[in-house]
Image (tube, helix red, strand yellow):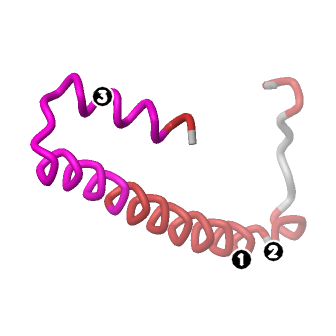
């Protein structure tokens, strides 16, 4: 909330830059892993559709079944 915002003296922020860089490194790595996982998941789903020659209705049923498991 805006009323909780404060101005801090520079000497109180000595570790802030380091902490922000550490946070960004962790976030970037996590975001990369999530993108790779999604890419593999989508490829697997699409491959199943191609291999089995499913139409969109049958493919949607397959996706729902996957979500339940």
Image position of 31 (left or right of 22): left
Front residue of this view, candidates 18 and 32: 32
Q: Quadrant of residue 61?
A: top left
Residue 37's place in the image compared with 61, above or below, is below
Count neighbours of disc 3 (C-alpha within 10 A) and say few if under 14, some if 14 to 19, many if 20 or more. few
Classify mark 3: helix, strand or loop: helix
Mark nearest the camera among 1 and 3 is 3
Query: Are the residues flagged by discs 1 and 3 in contact, CB closer than 8 Å?
Result: no
Task: Pick the residue in front: 35 or 17.
Answer: 35
Crowd tier of the residue under label 2, counting other residues whose Cα lies within 10 Å: few below 14, some 14–19, many 20 or above: few
Residue 45 lies in the magenta stretch: yes
Residue that label 1 marks? 18
Name the residue carrying label 3: 60
Residue drawn at x 37%, y 36% is: 63
Q: How many marks?
A: 3
Compare marks 3 and 2 and give the one earlier in the sequence: 2
Q: Which mark is residue 38?
A: none
Q: Quadrant of residue 64?
A: top left
- Spatial separation of the CA atoms under disc 1 and disc 2: 5 Å
State the CA–CA distance, disc 3 to disc 2.
Answer: 50 Å
Pick the quarter of the image with the C terminus: top right
Q: Is residue 32 above or below residue 60?
A: below
Q: Is residue 47 magenta?
A: yes
The kind of secondary structure element at disc 1 is helix
Seen in the image, is 6 located left or right of residue 50? right
Q: Position of residue 56 (x, y in %)?
A: 17, 27
Residue named by callout 2: 15
Please identify the dominant SS of the magenta region. helix
Residues shaded magenta: 40-66
- Check contact, mark 1 vs mark 2: CB within 8 A: yes
């Amino acid at each position: 909330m805006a009323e909780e915002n404060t101005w801090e003296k520079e000497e109180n922020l000595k570790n802030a830059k380091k902490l922000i860089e550490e946070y960004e490194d962790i976030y970037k790595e996590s975001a990369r892993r999530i993108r790779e996982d999604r890419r593999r998941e989508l490829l697997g789903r699409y491959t199943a559709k191609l291999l089995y020659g499913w139409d969109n209705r049958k493919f949607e049923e397959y996706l729902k079944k996957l979500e339940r498991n």
